[in-house]
């Protein structure tokens, strides 16, 4: 999730850095972003929202993500973004003799706004939610709800950063 936030904020800052200064630009510019990525990471039981926090074991996560995002950039520097991520994942325990492996998918949706201030700084508000579900090799089901909100002030201070994870079912 952090990779996605960094990508979106980076694109917004790059776009704002060029569109805010260009007074001859059209009133509204529309951009579409399509990105795919594969990530592999380790997780500990309870340490990472959406992965370890709902599972009683440590292991390795492999995730395949496809991002589709739409940006609307206004001449005054205000940028709006709506995005969807389609993903599949596998969760493999460090000790497969004790725990099942899981495979699943999710659809993540989010939206945000970046506003260029008269001083040339950026104010960002961003929210997302996803509901991953997975089935274990033993037939057990894991489902969760993850949602978050981030607000960054023009000086770069993170004013609000919340991630809420709720395990709907666990093994």
Image: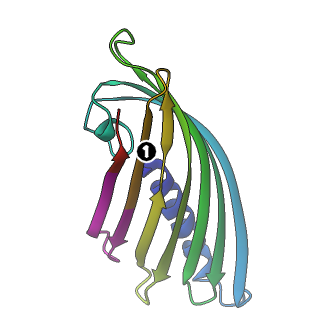
Residue 63 is at least partly visible in this image: no
Q: Is residue 58 above or below residue 162?
A: above
Can residue 3 be seen here?
Answer: yes
**Quadrant in the rendering for residue 15:** bottom right
- Crowd rating for badge 1 (residues with CA inside 10 Å; few <14, some 14–19, many 20+): some
Q: Position of residue 99 (x, y in %)?
A: 36, 18
Is residue 47 toward the left or the right of residue 81 in the image? left
Point out residue 38 in the picture as x, y percentages from the top left corner: 58, 35
State the image quarter where residue 100 is shown: top left
The residue tagged with tag 1: helix, strand or loop? strand
27 part of magenta stretch = no
Q: The C terminus lies in which quarter of the figure?
A: top left
Question: At 43% across and 86% down in the image, what residue appears?
Answer: 117
Q: Residue at x 32, y 58 (%)?
A: 163
Q: Percent from the top left, x then y, of residue 63?
A: 54, 35
Image coordinates for residue 130, horizontal then vertical, percent: 48, 56
Q: Which residue is mark 1?
A: 143
**At x 42% / y 74%, what residue is drawn?**
124
Q: Is residue 151 magenta?
A: yes
**Boundaries of the magenta span:** 148-166
């Amino acid at each position: 999730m952090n990779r996605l936030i960094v990508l979106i904020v980076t694109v917004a800052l790059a776009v704002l850095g060029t569109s805010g200064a260009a007074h001859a630009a059209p009133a509204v510019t529309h951009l579409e972003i399509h990105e795919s990525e594969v990530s592999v990471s380790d997780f500990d039981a309870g340490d990472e929202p959406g992965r370890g926090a709902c599972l009683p074991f440590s292991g390795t996560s492999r995730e395949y993500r496809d991002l589709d995002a739409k940006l609307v950039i206004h001449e005054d520097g205000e940028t709006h973004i709506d995005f969807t991520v389609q993903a599949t994942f596998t969760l493999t325990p460090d000790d497969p003799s004790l725990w099942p492996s899981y495979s699943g998918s999710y659809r993540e949706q989010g939206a945000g706004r970046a506003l260029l201030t008269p001083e040339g700084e950026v104010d960002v508000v961003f929210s997302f939610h996803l509901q991953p579900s997975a089935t274990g090799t033993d037939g057990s089901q894991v489902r969760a709800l993850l949602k978050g909100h981030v607000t960054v002030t023009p000086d770069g201070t993170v004013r609000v950063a919340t991630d809420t994870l709720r395990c709907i079912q666990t093994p």
